[in-house]
Amino acid sequence: MKLTIATRESRLALWQAEHVKALLEQRGHSVTLLGMTTKGDQILDRSLSKVGGKGLFVKELEVALEEGRADLAVHSLKDVPMELPGGFVLACVMEREDPRDAFVSPKYANLAALPRGAVVGTSSLRRVALLRAARPDLKIEPLRGNLDTRLRKLDEGQYDAIVLAAAGLKRLGLENRIRSVFAPSEMLPAAGQGALGIEIRSDRADVQEALGPLTHPGTWLRVAAERAVSRALGGSCSMPLAAYATLAGSSLSIQAAWGDPEGRVSLVSADASAPATDLAAAEVLGTQVAARLRDGVLRAGGSLDTEKH
């Protein structure tokens, strides 16, 4: 089968698309890449939460699918909006790479080693909230751009440290840049972090069938629960929300956390565990955790509604 993959043109996005291409070619398909620059790649002077969210990274790829110029789009799952437009489906979730956040610094070994007032770069509201909860004495500054740009800004001395997804660094062979990795108990990951999701048009049953062997059921169960938390709370990049699930046998456990990026309200967390053998059960569990988290945020005096687009 001949397939065209729509992909962003950043080095990490191209690695991810090439990875999927190689796996499909191993299964006898003929695959080409359609590289595209998205609005999310072009707007670098403002935070994503102020210019339309992470959906800016996928819209142009969806247009290519709609027009038939591509058959599938490969995304970092944490960049995929919780609700896809009509006519599109998430057809495949692949096995997860390391879901944790990485501490990257030329001088300091870990977060605890940073001196008071040190400058830490991130543009994730989730990371801002979790960093403020752990180290309110730090100065947290915005950091946009692709992975190489962010590392260059660190190396130029604009920051004392930056926080990045461990998965991206590992995929690009940059694991040596990681000084330490945050345990989920220290910095809870974003919903879907480290997983790749493949989007197709909902009428392409042929493409869905071709992607079947690439699906990793355990990862899909976990991220379905995580994304359900975010979906139930209207989650987007403008919400400082973390959600992370683990699977032991058929028992699915999920933790979620909400924090105030300004540090005015204490970090709020919620968790639950239940047997889950299908996506529907995973999503029910995620929705239950979301309800608990919402109650906790309201009791703490925070507001989820103001964080929505």
Image (cartoon, grey):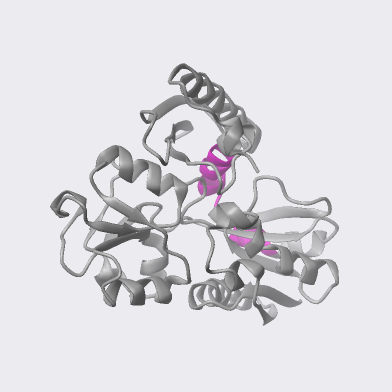
**Can the viewer see residue 145 in this picture?**
yes
Q: Is residue 148 above or below residue 212?
A: below
- Residue 210 on image: x %, y %: 71, 65
Q: Is residue 70 magenta?
A: no
Residue at (40% x, 62% y) in the render: 167
Residue at (39% x, 47% y) in the render: 128
| Of residues 79 and 26, the one drawn nearer to the viewer in this rendering | 79
Q: How many marks?
A: 0
Quarter of the picture containing the N terminus is bottom right
The residues colored magenta run 211-227
- Residue 20 on image: x %, y %: 58, 71
Corner quadrant of residue 282: top right
Corner quadrant of residue 34: bottom right
- Residue 10 on image: x %, y %: 53, 76
| Of residues 24 and 178, the one drawn nearer to the viewer in this rendering | 178
Residue at (36% x, 28% y) in the render: 266
- Residue 81 on image: x %, y %: 65, 50
| Of residues 272 and 262, the one drawn nearer to the viewer in this rendering | 262
Decide if residue 39 is on the left or right side of residue 132: right
**Can the viewer see residue 93 in this picture?**
no
Q: Is residue 224 magenta?
A: yes
Q: Could you tell me what secondary structure mostly forms the magenta stretch?
A: helix
Quarter of the picture containing the C terminus is top right
Corner quadrant of residue 259: top left
| Of residues 283 and 103, the one drawn nearer to the viewer in this rendering | 103
Residue at (37% x, 60% y) in the render: 164
